[in-house]
Image (cartoon, helix red, strand yellow):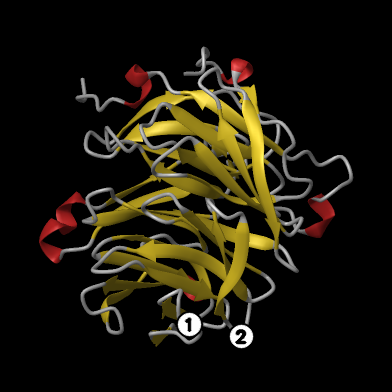
Amino acid sequence: MIKSNQASQDMEVQHPPTDGISEMQFSPTADLLAAASWDNNVRIYEIQPNGTSVAKAMYQHSAPALCCAWSKDGTKLVSGGADKIAKLFDISTGQSTQVAQHDAPIKEVRWVDGASPILATGSWDKTIKYWDTRQPTPISTVNLPERLYAMDSVFPLLVAATADRHLVIYNLNNPSTPFKSMTSPLKWQTRTISCFPAGTGYGIGSIEGRVAIQYVEDKDASLNFSFKCHREGGQTVRDKATVYSVNCINWHPIHGTFSTAGADGSFAFWDKDSRQKLKTFPKVGSPISTTCFNRNGTIFAYAVSYDWNKGHTGATAQTQNKIMLHSVNEIDVKPRKRA
């Protein structure tokens, strides 16, 4: 267990990616951290009990790697990239093989629970494809209204967010037909989406410093709400707020509370049921592009990395790319009754 809980004491992962960090995911069975990067590589680090890290493996796409996801048994890692393919990396053999193909970059990959493990890939080609990774052709292809920007799944729920603020919700017992289609409750472009651990709803974040908590069933609509976050100023009418993108939402695996992280370089922990902030942490000086909890919620990993919120002009030779490990203090993530 890492012996610190202040942002200034967080541990830095050695040998980080050399370009923007697009997605990180912890293994569900071990403290193995995967990181996909714009340097075309996917790296796997082993996090030691004292918080130090060891680079364990690396494999390549032929273009930026945009996403990654572990299989439920932790034996395989899948990644998708701007090379329009998904690759499957076998931890035991150290070999990677192509398992999926699209007509445009693959933005999201998720393993779908069920009778057998199925891979869902979402692309800017406006489709989601479902794959048995042993077969060269998809089991099913679903057309989306626009390019896919974000996707997440907790069986039987899969939620896809596309350009033009479309949301398409699927019941994976019938994965080819949308269960519900709607417009995002947020007024600006969707940046991230993350399903509740119970699979009853999802959190969605936009480029306009706002998060919405949404339940799937209409009977739970009274529980839906949204809130502002990752903003500066705006306390008075004359003082206009500086608004930052919400880049990542993650759910704590034990307590069901959640984190947000943004282009303002900060992260915070929240309780959706009491609708309150639990803890805010100091800014780290650069955008946080992606985050994740480990399997028991004791480590929170965050990537300090340019997120393209200012376009290509914001990317400089001095742009840093770091992966930091924060030791989670349980009091910061436990649900709290509103006073």
Q: Is residue 128 above or below residue 58?
A: below
Q: Which percent across, then down, holds residue 63?
A: 74, 67
Determine if residue 308 is in view. Answer: yes
Q: Which mark is residue 291?
A: none
Quadrant in which residue 338 is drawn: top left
In the image: residue 264, left or right of residue 225: right
- At x 41% / y 44%, what residue is drawn? 250
Q: Say whether disc 1 or disc 2 marks the residue closer to the N-terminus.
A: 2
- At x 16% / y 53%, what residue is drawn? 222
Q: Which percent across, then down, holds residue 247?
A: 54, 49
Residue indicated by mark 1: 127
Front-most of residues 156 and 216: 156
Q: Secondary structure at mark 2?
A: loop
Q: Which percent across, then down, holds residue 273?
A: 22, 38
Determine if residue 214 is in view. Answer: no
Q: Amino acid at mark 1?
A: Thr
Residue indicated by mark 2: 103
Front-most of residues 283 and 234: 283
Quadrant in which residue 95 is drawn: bottom right
Q: Amino acid at mark 2?
A: Asp
The alpha-carbon separation of the residues under discs 1 and 2 comes to 9 Å
Q: Is residue 335 above or below residue 148?
A: above
Q: In the current view of this chain or complex, which residue is farthest to the front?
A: 93
Q: Which percent across, then down, holds residue 332?
A: 37, 21
Q: Are marks 1 and 2 in contact (CB under 8 Å)?
A: yes
Q: Secondary structure at mark 1?
A: strand
Quadrant in which residue 101 is drawn: bottom right
